[in-house]
Image: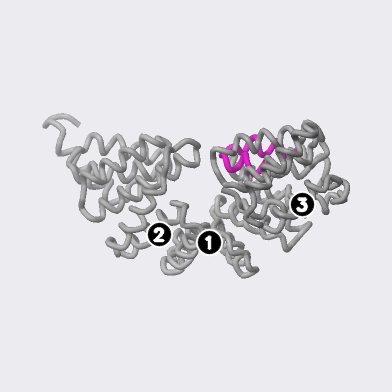
Amino acid sequence: MRFVRAGTVVLEVVVVLLLAGVSLQAWQSDERLKRVTEDLFSRAEHVDADIAELKSVLGADPKSAQAHMLLGIAYRAKGSPDLMAEAIGELRQAVALDPSLIPAYLYLAHLYLDLSRPDRAKEELQAALTQAPGQPQFLALLAECERQLGNPKDALELAQKALAANPSLAEARFYEGKALYDLGRRDEAIQDFERVVQDGAQRFEVYSSLGTAYLDTGRTDQAIGSLTEAIKLDPSRPEPMIQLARAYRLKGDLARAELPLAHARTLMGQAVSAADQQVERDWYVEEGELRLQMKQIDAAARALKKAVDLDSSFGPGHRYLAEVYIRQGLYTQAQDQAVRAEKLGSPLPADLRKLLDAKLRASRPKGRS
């Protein structure tokens, strides 16, 4: 999910309209559309009634671009994965009827990012920027698209352009931090995340990213605090629970590590998108590392094998699976995993590499090199 979450959707629509110089009255001529907009803007819990009203409006006027846009936004506000296709369909209909309706492009971009389609999100934002050049909210979200497409340098540049236009835009500050993190500039990323928190953003994504960054820089206690806050803000998400388990494991508190990891597993449904598969992979890696540390070697092997089956390009999975195979005395399999891990930038520690080499030499028939 993105930094802008369902429940605040109409606020961003109004902001974008105003920044684009669009009169609210110009697209709220229908009294029913105005009422639905105000209802969504107030974050009232009437989304089902709003959807019914918008369908009624479209029954009378199927070519109302504003009604199609609001219906797409209302579908997204429901937060149901089953309604994402309907939301996209309504927003696409809106821009087909009125290509100048730039808020629809913004929400199409958010939806495509929700569905792990940064390429499609980028297309929508580029279309919007042709009509609202330099609009900082669009630039900020475009930065996140580039980051997810594997272009953190481009992402950083776009986020910085957005911040130059609007230094108080928390979304741009957050995405700048994400780009910095991907570039390995973790202390700078932490500064961005901390500033977003200090400026009052109570967002799951911010605390989750901050906690992970703390953990990667060895600030385990701070990580636990931030990850715990992320879980409070959105207890339906497994990602911070996996990281919290990792934090407790690194502290040596293995019993406490088991609880969030087990709970995270109950929140993971069928892995459909690439993002879902990554979460599942991370869960199996953490399960494997925890079982390895608890000396439950067979269980560790099963978990890590599932992790590398899910993502054969993930170096840490191969590195830990190599260690497990060493513990099991499966030195040929361990060598295979170690070679893969090293190619992927996750080599075995020197002591394990030395041990594996010695075991491989001892296992060769005499007289063979």
The residue drawn where x is 66% and y is 45% is 74
Tag 3 near tag 2, CB within 8 Å: no
Q: Is residue 261 magenta?
A: no
Q: Is residue 213 above or below residue 140?
A: below
Element type at marker 3?
helix
Return the disc, 1 or 2, that comes first in the chain's sequence: 1
Q: Secondary structure at mark 1?
A: helix
Q: Nearer the viewer, residue 255 or 40?
A: 40
Say which residue label 3 marks: 35
- Of residue 22 and residue 149, the one placed in the foreground of this image is 22
Q: CA distance from mark 1 to mark 2?
A: 12 Å
User: How many residues crowd mark 2 within 10 Å: few (<14), some (14–19), many (20+)?
Assistant: many
Give 306 or 5, whichever is nearer the viewer: 5
For label 2, the residue is 244
Instruction: Give above or below for 310 relative to 349.
Output: above
Task: Sort mark 3 into few (<14), some (14-19) or many (20+) by Cα contacts within 10 Å.
Answer: some
Residue 57 image offset from top left, x and y in percent: 76, 39
Q: Quadrant of the C terminus?
A: top left
Left or right, 218 with reference to 321 = right
At mark 2, the secondary structure is helix
Looking at the rendering, the stretch of residues picked out in magenta corresponds to 109-126
Instruction: Say whether disc 1 or disc 3 marks the residue closer to the N-terminus.
Output: 3
Identity, as a three-letter code, of the amino acid under mark 3: Arg
Residue at 76 percent across and 45 percent down: it is 103
What residue is disc 1 on? 207
